[in-house]
Image (spheres, rainbow, N blue to C red):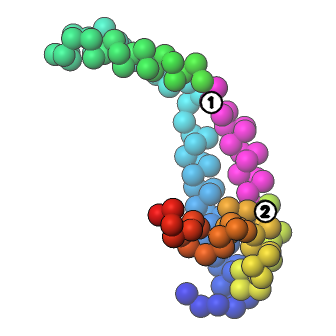
Amino acid sequence: MTTGPGSSLKLLGVVLSAVLLHLYRLTSLPEKPPPIDWVYYKTAVAKAGMVDEFEKKVRFSSSIRCCSCFEIQVEAAHILEKFRTMIPFDQMMWEDLNEIFPETRLDKKYPYWPHKPIENL
């Protein structure tokens, strides 16, 4: 990949198109998935209790709050705004990178890999 002022814009265009494609796919899904026919699976699966155990897990996981399409769109808009306003990667210093992407910040005590003293490995 070439470096220069145009390459960052090309990279941003690729990232934006991928994000918009995923956003389109997520918004095209129905709000609620179709219901599962548990009676059919209880008759079709040979192992007794397997469907009941899976049904309990599905009911538990469905009680956990899921993100709505609107929340996903808002999050995607925040990510896009973050990429639009940041300086190009080829002009960034380490401090800029760590400020924009905090997960890239190295541990202050052990700044180099493996991030632990050798005695503890």
Above/below status of 25 relative to 102? above
Q: Residue under circle 2?
A: 82
Mark 1: amino acid = Cys
Residue 16 in the magenta stretch? The answer is no
Q: Residue pushed farthest left?
A: 46
Secondary structure, mark 2, is helix
Label 1, on which residue?
66
Residue 31 x/y as whole percent: 59, 28
Q: Is the C-beta separation of discs 2 and 1 under 8 Å?
A: no
99 horizontally vs 103: left or right: right
| Secondary structure beneath label 1 | loop
Badge number at residue 46: none
Is residue 40 visible in the rendered image? The answer is: no
In the image, what residue occupies the spot 71% across and 80% down? Answer: 89
Which residues lie in the magenta part?
A: 65-80
Q: Position of residue 111 (x, y in %)?
A: 66, 73
Name the residue: 73% across, 68% down. Answer: 108
Q: Is residue 116 or residue 22 the one in the foreground?
A: 116
What's the residue at 71%, 86% (across, down)?
Answer: 90
Amino acid residing under circle 2? Lys
Question: Along the polypeptide, which appears first: circle 2 or circle 1?
Answer: 1
